[in-house]
Image (tube, grey):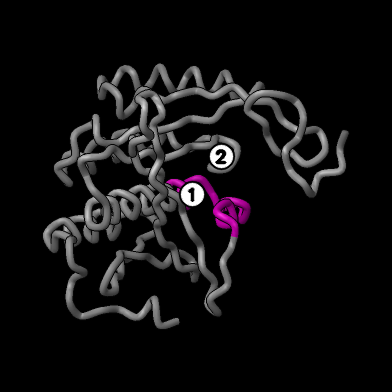
Amino acid sequence: MKRFKQSKAFPAGFNPQQLRCCQQLLADLPYPAQLHWNEREVFACFDGWWLTSEFFPVASFYDAAPQRAHYAARLRIHGRFGQNLPANWLFALNYGESKTVSLLKLIRVLHLLNHLGRNDVALPLRIDLDPRICHAFSDRIIDFTTALLAQLGLASQQVMFLLFINQPTSELGGRWCAVTANKAIWWGWAALAIASTTCRGCGGWSRTSSACRRASCAAP
Protein backbone atom coordinates (compact mmCIF):
# COMPACT_ATOMS: atom_id res chain seq x y z
CA MET A 1 0.00 0.00 0.00
CA LYS A 2 1.22 3.45 -0.85
CA ARG A 3 0.28 4.74 2.59
CA PHE A 4 2.77 2.39 4.24
CA LYS A 5 5.73 3.24 2.05
CA GLN A 6 8.61 4.45 4.20
CA SER A 7 9.47 8.11 3.71
CA LYS A 8 13.12 9.19 3.79
CA ALA A 9 12.35 12.47 5.56
CA PHE A 10 10.73 12.67 8.98
CA PRO A 11 7.10 13.82 8.89
CA ALA A 12 6.48 17.49 9.59
CA GLY A 13 5.67 18.23 13.23
CA PHE A 14 7.48 15.16 14.60
CA ASN A 15 10.64 15.28 16.68
CA PRO A 16 13.38 13.07 15.11
CA GLN A 17 15.07 12.54 18.48
CA GLN A 18 11.83 11.29 20.01
CA LEU A 19 11.37 8.91 17.10
CA ARG A 20 14.86 7.50 17.55
CA CYS A 21 14.37 7.04 21.30
CA CYS A 22 11.08 5.21 20.76
CA GLN A 23 12.68 3.02 18.10
CA GLN A 24 15.23 1.91 20.69
CA LEU A 25 12.53 1.25 23.30
CA LEU A 26 10.64 -0.97 20.87
CA ALA A 27 13.81 -2.74 19.71
CA ASP A 28 14.43 -3.87 23.30
CA LEU A 29 11.02 -5.57 23.66
CA PRO A 30 10.75 -9.38 23.84
CA TYR A 31 8.94 -9.11 20.51
CA PRO A 32 10.72 -6.18 18.83
CA ALA A 33 8.74 -3.82 16.63
CA GLN A 34 9.86 -1.05 14.33
CA LEU A 35 8.32 2.32 13.65
CA HIS A 36 7.85 3.63 10.12
CA TRP A 37 6.59 6.95 8.82
CA ASN A 38 5.27 8.71 5.76
CA GLU A 39 4.81 12.42 5.14
CA ARG A 40 2.09 12.83 7.78
CA GLU A 41 2.11 10.03 10.36
CA VAL A 42 4.03 7.36 12.22
CA PHE A 43 2.87 3.76 11.83
CA ALA A 44 4.15 0.31 12.72
CA CYS A 45 4.09 -3.30 11.61
CA PHE A 46 3.31 -6.05 14.10
CA ASP A 47 3.12 -9.70 13.13
CA GLY A 48 2.45 -8.76 9.51
CA TRP A 49 -0.31 -6.20 10.26
CA TRP A 50 -0.02 -2.45 9.83
CA LEU A 51 -1.01 -0.36 12.86
CA THR A 52 -1.99 3.32 12.76
CA SER A 53 -3.46 5.87 15.16
CA GLU A 54 -6.65 7.81 14.60
CA PHE A 55 -7.88 10.66 16.78
CA PHE A 56 -11.30 12.13 17.43
CA PRO A 57 -11.88 15.50 19.11
CA VAL A 58 -14.21 15.24 22.11
CA ALA A 59 -16.32 18.27 22.99
CA SER A 60 -17.29 19.58 26.41
CA PHE A 61 -20.78 21.00 26.91
CA TYR A 62 -20.32 22.41 30.38
CA ASP A 63 -20.25 25.94 29.02
CA ALA A 64 -22.81 27.68 26.84
CA ALA A 65 -21.00 26.72 23.66
CA PRO A 66 -19.34 23.33 23.08
CA GLN A 67 -15.56 23.38 23.21
CA ARG A 68 -12.92 20.79 22.45
CA ALA A 69 -11.96 19.08 25.70
CA HIS A 70 -9.52 16.39 24.58
CA TYR A 71 -8.64 13.94 21.82
CA ALA A 72 -9.63 10.26 21.95
CA ALA A 73 -7.15 7.81 20.41
CA ARG A 74 -8.23 4.80 18.36
CA LEU A 75 -6.12 1.95 17.03
CA ARG A 76 -6.57 1.08 13.37
CA ILE A 77 -5.38 -2.26 11.95
CA HIS A 78 -4.78 -2.76 8.25
CA GLY A 79 -4.15 -5.96 6.30
CA ARG A 80 -1.60 -6.45 3.57
CA PHE A 81 -4.18 -5.74 0.87
CA GLY A 82 -5.55 -2.59 2.46
CA GLN A 83 -8.48 -4.13 4.31
CA ASN A 84 -9.45 -2.54 7.64
CA LEU A 85 -9.79 -4.89 10.58
CA PRO A 86 -11.50 -4.51 13.98
CA ALA A 87 -9.38 -2.88 16.69
CA ASN A 88 -9.51 -6.06 18.81
CA TRP A 89 -8.33 -8.29 15.96
CA LEU A 90 -4.78 -8.83 17.21
CA PHE A 91 -5.91 -9.49 20.78
CA ALA A 92 -8.32 -12.14 19.51
CA LEU A 93 -5.36 -14.12 18.15
CA ASN A 94 -4.58 -15.31 21.70
CA TYR A 95 -0.95 -14.25 21.82
CA GLY A 96 1.02 -15.23 24.88
CA GLU A 97 1.43 -12.74 27.71
CA SER A 98 4.88 -11.52 26.63
CA LYS A 99 3.75 -10.86 23.05
CA THR A 100 0.54 -9.18 24.18
CA VAL A 101 2.42 -6.85 26.53
CA SER A 102 4.84 -5.98 23.70
CA LEU A 103 1.84 -5.15 21.50
CA LEU A 104 0.35 -2.92 24.20
CA LYS A 105 3.64 -1.05 24.55
CA LEU A 106 3.83 -0.55 20.79
CA ILE A 107 0.29 0.84 20.69
CA ARG A 108 1.08 3.20 23.57
CA VAL A 109 4.17 4.51 21.73
CA LEU A 110 2.23 4.86 18.49
CA HIS A 111 -0.60 6.89 20.03
CA LEU A 112 1.66 9.23 22.01
CA LEU A 113 4.04 9.92 19.13
CA ASN A 114 1.23 10.65 16.68
CA HIS A 115 -0.55 12.82 19.22
CA LEU A 116 2.57 14.94 19.67
CA GLY A 117 3.17 15.22 15.95
CA ARG A 118 -0.37 15.68 14.65
CA ASN A 119 -2.57 17.21 17.34
CA ASP A 120 -2.85 20.38 19.36
CA VAL A 121 -0.97 19.21 22.45
CA ALA A 122 -2.62 21.92 24.52
CA LEU A 123 -5.53 19.44 24.69
CA PRO A 124 -5.10 16.16 26.62
CA LEU A 125 -5.11 12.76 24.96
CA ARG A 126 -7.54 10.07 26.13
CA ILE A 127 -6.67 6.39 25.70
CA ASP A 128 -9.45 3.88 26.36
CA LEU A 129 -8.68 0.59 28.10
CA ASP A 130 -10.96 -2.44 28.07
CA PRO A 131 -9.68 -5.38 30.16
CA ARG A 132 -11.84 -7.80 28.15
CA ILE A 133 -9.99 -6.89 24.95
CA CYS A 134 -6.39 -6.64 26.15
CA HIS A 135 -6.65 -9.59 28.58
CA ALA A 136 -6.18 -7.27 31.57
CA PHE A 137 -2.49 -6.76 30.81
CA SER A 138 -2.68 -2.95 30.79
CA ASP A 139 -1.43 -2.81 34.37
CA ARG A 140 1.79 -4.53 33.23
CA ILE A 141 2.96 -1.44 31.34
CA ILE A 142 2.44 1.25 33.96
CA ASP A 143 6.17 1.76 34.58
CA PHE A 144 6.82 1.66 30.82
CA THR A 145 4.22 4.37 30.19
CA THR A 146 5.55 6.49 33.05
CA ALA A 147 9.04 6.40 31.54
CA LEU A 148 7.66 7.00 28.05
CA LEU A 149 5.76 10.12 29.13
CA ALA A 150 8.90 11.50 30.75
CA GLN A 151 11.01 10.72 27.71
CA LEU A 152 8.53 12.46 25.39
CA GLY A 153 8.23 15.46 27.70
CA LEU A 154 4.52 14.92 28.32
CA ALA A 155 3.09 15.92 31.69
CA SER A 156 0.74 13.41 33.32
CA GLN A 157 -2.11 15.92 33.02
CA GLN A 158 -1.81 15.70 29.24
CA VAL A 159 -2.77 12.02 29.06
CA MET A 160 -5.74 10.32 30.68
CA PHE A 161 -6.95 6.74 30.59
CA LEU A 162 -10.56 5.62 30.51
CA LEU A 163 -11.02 2.18 32.03
CA PHE A 164 -14.21 0.36 31.01
CA ILE A 165 -15.40 -2.19 33.54
CA ASN A 166 -18.46 -4.37 34.00
CA GLN A 167 -19.43 -6.85 36.70
CA PRO A 168 -16.82 -9.51 35.79
CA THR A 169 -14.03 -6.94 35.54
CA SER A 170 -15.01 -4.60 38.38
CA GLU A 171 -12.67 -6.30 40.85
CA LEU A 172 -9.83 -6.06 38.36
CA GLY A 173 -10.67 -2.40 37.72
CA GLY A 174 -10.51 -1.61 41.42
CA ARG A 175 -7.10 -3.25 41.74
CA TRP A 176 -5.86 -1.44 38.63
CA CYS A 177 -6.99 1.94 39.95
CA ALA A 178 -5.29 1.25 43.28
CA VAL A 179 -2.03 0.33 41.59
CA THR A 180 -2.04 3.37 39.36
CA ALA A 181 -2.99 5.66 42.23
CA ASN A 182 0.13 4.52 44.06
CA LYS A 183 2.17 5.80 41.13
CA ALA A 184 1.02 9.32 42.06
CA ILE A 185 0.58 10.42 38.47
CA TRP A 186 -2.47 12.58 39.17
CA TRP A 187 -5.05 12.81 36.37
CA GLY A 188 -3.19 10.77 33.78
CA TRP A 189 -3.45 7.55 35.80
CA ALA A 190 -6.68 8.24 37.65
CA ALA A 191 -8.70 5.82 35.55
CA LEU A 192 -12.37 6.64 35.06
CA ALA A 193 -14.41 3.51 35.68
CA ILE A 194 -17.65 3.37 33.71
CA ALA A 195 -20.02 0.71 35.00
CA SER A 196 -21.64 -1.33 32.28
CA THR A 197 -23.56 -4.52 31.74
CA THR A 198 -22.86 -7.27 29.26
CA CYS A 199 -25.38 -8.65 26.77
CA ARG A 200 -26.02 -12.38 27.22
CA GLY A 201 -26.48 -12.79 23.50
CA CYS A 202 -23.43 -11.22 21.87
CA GLY A 203 -21.21 -9.97 24.69
CA GLY A 204 -21.73 -6.33 23.74
CA TRP A 205 -21.95 -3.81 26.57
CA SER A 206 -24.21 -0.94 27.42
CA ARG A 207 -23.27 1.90 29.74
CA THR A 208 -26.68 2.50 31.24
CA SER A 209 -28.89 -0.55 30.85
CA SER A 210 -28.95 -4.27 30.14
CA ALA A 211 -30.49 -3.65 26.73
CA CYS A 212 -27.98 -4.46 24.00
CA ARG A 213 -27.27 -1.62 21.59
CA ARG A 214 -25.90 -3.75 18.79
CA ALA A 215 -28.25 -3.85 15.81
CA SER A 216 -26.92 -7.30 14.83
CA CYS A 217 -27.82 -8.85 18.19
CA ALA A 218 -31.06 -10.80 18.33
CA ALA A 219 -31.05 -11.22 22.11
CA PRO A 220 -34.04 -9.75 23.96
Closer to the chain start, of discs 2 and 1, is 1
> Which range is magenta?
86-101
Marks 2/1 in contact by CB < 8 Å: the verdict is yes
> Which quarter shows the N terminus?
bottom left
Q: Specify few, some or many for label 1: CA neighbours under 10 Å numbering under 14, 14-19, or 20 or more.
A: many
Q: What residue type is disc 1 on?
A: Thr
Residue at image point 41% right, 25% down? 191
> Which quarter shows the C terminus?
top right
Label 1 residue SS:
helix
Residue at image point 41% right, 67% down? 45
Q: Residue under circle 2?
A: 135
Q: What residue type is disc 2 on?
A: His
Location of residue 86 (image quadrant): bottom right
In the visual, does 27 lie left or right of 154?
right
Q: Which mark is residue 100?
A: 1
Residue at image point 25% right, 24% down? 185
Is 91 drawn above or below residue 179 in the view shown? below
- Name the foreground residue: 119 vs 86: 119
Q: List the single residue furthest toward the left.
A: 17
Magenta includes 39? Answer: no
Q: Which mark is residue 37?
A: none
The total of numbered circles placed on residues is 2
Is 81 drawn above or below residue 205 in the view shown? below
Residue at image point 30% right, 78% down? 6
Label 2 residue SS:
loop
Residue 8, image x and y in percent?
20, 80
Residue 97, image x and y in percent?
50, 45
Residue 146, image x and y in percent?
25, 35
Can residue 168 be seen in the rendering of this structure? no
Is 211 drawn above or below residue 22 in the view shown? above
